[in-house]
């Protein structure tokens, strides 16, 4: 019952967010997603005592659950090769490598900066430096990772309320993503940096947030089941349920590994994605892969992401973060400014005509999730004519090398590493990332400039760099 009440409350907040996005001009023009608006309203409602039927802990559980569902859905969704990828594979690969390793740099810098800030000012607020380790999970990966690793730190390492603090950072990350990202996108449109905008005005369904009846709309997918037997939606969710049970089994097996087993088994989302890939592979071998419609499966991913965002806001109790709101805010702003500066610096140098779109997508992803990054890209590239969205997906491959950072974070949290040794180990991989970017030519001359009108000439330089 509590789960359904929480689900119902999240649904109400989503609807309120949609209405506000549609009716309030300032928020509509900022292009803030309804899930973020509804989440902020839910955060206020949950902390005013107006609702007592469900505790904030239930929303944290929902975040963890939906995060696993999201990764299962990603595993079940095929990624057909796009025309952009096929026609210009080297450019796409360079973009994915550049964005992926820049993300790795941010993922390593954020916890180092976080713990140093808390080491310097945390004592005045009674906040231990170890909470600074939660920033990369929240900013660079989103609420699901923040809740998952926060729970591991809380349950296994005794770091009280780590999941709640992680979700707080995640909620702030989403706000800063659009508070800074949307004005940057508008600036790029005004200055002509967005090469895939037919008009310098943001209009239509992009700004409204919904389609009118007479507008042409994308399809939700195709039916794969005869409804008299089993509904297509039922079948897709049944497969997700099978994958979830398989993920639980895999996590249980890994829990028996000495030492690191309990920590690895707590990362249920990883096993969820593996289960999704495995089930998809088996269905392909049995020649029944067509029963899963990729378009509809991607909509399930979007559904789980929207509810995950709302629940992440509603799972933050002011009673926990109230005394620490000042250091949390200071850390968030500093890490945001650092992320923005690094994204713009390297984004200008990836070496293609869509570098501004890449900058926006990278910043959005570094402050939340890949969907938030794509949301910023769609402001300047509504039809996704550039391969940026594909590159944001492919950048997950070079991002896999960041597991050394994850291991270091958990070692510091467990007490196996001292603060300063841990900070040095967090920073150690960054020169390697930079070297890889230089060798792969993902770090080259500028292709555009934020503050001048010389972007057209610089794009010619970028094109020459790209063709070299």
Image (tube, grey):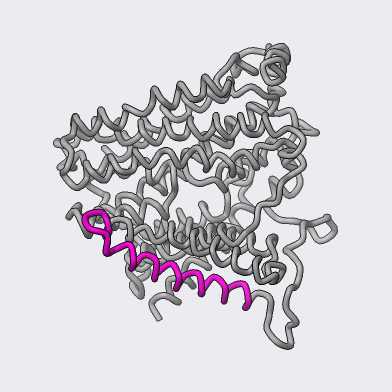
Give the residue drawn at x 42%, y 30%. Answer: 105
Q: Is residue 93 left or right of residue 331?
A: right
Q: Residue furthest bottom?
A: 228
Where in the figure is residue 38, as x and y percent of width and height? 51, 57
Residue 408, placed above or below residue 76: above
| Magenta stretch: includes residue 241 | yes
Where in the figure is residue 197, as x and y percent of width and height? 76, 33
Looking at the picture, tell me which residue is in the foreground, 334 or 298: 298
Q: Is residue 181 left or right of residue 400?
A: right
Q: Is residue 352 left or right of residue 268?
A: right
Is residue 264 among what the camera can see? yes
Where in the figure is residue 156, as x and y percent of width and height? 21, 57
Where in the figure is residue 329, as x and y percent of width and height? 33, 38
Stretch in magenta = 234-262
Residue 193, placed above or below residue 43: above
Residue 114 lies in what quarter of the image?
top left
């Amino acid at each position: 019952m509590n789960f359904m009440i929480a689900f119902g409350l999240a649904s109400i907040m989503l609807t309120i967010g949609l209405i506000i996005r549609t009716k309030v001009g300032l928020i509509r023009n900022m292009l803030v997603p309804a899930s973020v608006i509804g989440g902020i309203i839910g955060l206020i409602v949950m902390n005013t005592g107006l609702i007592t039927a469900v505790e904030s802990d239930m929303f944290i559980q929902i975040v963890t659950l939906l995060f696993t569902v999201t990764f299962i859905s990603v595993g079940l969704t095929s990624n057909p090769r796009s025309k952009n990828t096929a026609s210009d594979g080297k450019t796409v690969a360079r973009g994915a490598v550049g964005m992926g390793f820049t993300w790795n740099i941010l993922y390593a810098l954020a916890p180092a900066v976080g713990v140093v800030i808390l080491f310097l000012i945390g004592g005045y607020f009674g906040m231990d430096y170890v909470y600074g380790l939660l920033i990369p999970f929240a900013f660079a990966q989103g609420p699901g990772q923040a809740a998952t690793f926060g729970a591991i730190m809380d349950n296994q390492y005794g770091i009280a309320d780590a999941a709640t603090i992680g979700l707080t950072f995640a909620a702030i990350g989403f706000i800063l993503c659009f508070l800074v990202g949307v004005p940057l996108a508008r600036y790029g449109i005004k200055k002509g940096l967005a090469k895939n905008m037919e008009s310098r005005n943001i209009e239509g369904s992009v700004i409204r947030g919904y389609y009118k009846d007479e507008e042409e709309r994308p399809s939700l997918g195709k039916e794969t089941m005869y409804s008299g037997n089993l509904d297509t939606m039922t079948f897709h969710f049944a497969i997700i349920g099978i994958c979830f049970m398989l993920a639980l089994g895999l996590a249980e097996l890994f829990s028996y590994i000495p030492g690191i087993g309990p920590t690895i088994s707590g990362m249920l989302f990883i096993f969820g994605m593996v289960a999704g890939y495995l089930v998809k592979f088996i269905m392909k071998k049995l020649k029944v892969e067509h029963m899963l419609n990729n378009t509809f499966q991607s909509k399930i991913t979007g559904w789980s992401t929207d509810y995950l965002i709302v629940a992440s806001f509603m799972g933050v109790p002011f009673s926990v973060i109230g005394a620490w709101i000042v250091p949390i805010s200071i850390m968030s702003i500093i890490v945001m400014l650092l992320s923005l500066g690094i994204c713009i610096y390297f984004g200008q140098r990836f070496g293609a005509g869509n570098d501004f779109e890449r900058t926006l997508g990278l910043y959005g992803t570094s402050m939340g999730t890949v969907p938030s990054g794509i949301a910023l890209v769609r402001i300047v590239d509504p039809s996704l004519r550039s391969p940026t969205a594909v590159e944001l997906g492919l950048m997950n491959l070079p991002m896999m090398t960041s597991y050394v950072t994850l291991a270091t974070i958990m070692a510091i949290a467990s007490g196996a590493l001292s603060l300063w040794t841990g900070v040095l180990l967090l920073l150690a991989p960054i020169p390697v990332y930079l070297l890889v970017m230089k060798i792969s030519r993902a770090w080259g001359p500028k292709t555009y400039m934020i503050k001048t009108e010389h972007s057209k000439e610089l794009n010619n330089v970028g094109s020459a760099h790209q063709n070299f």
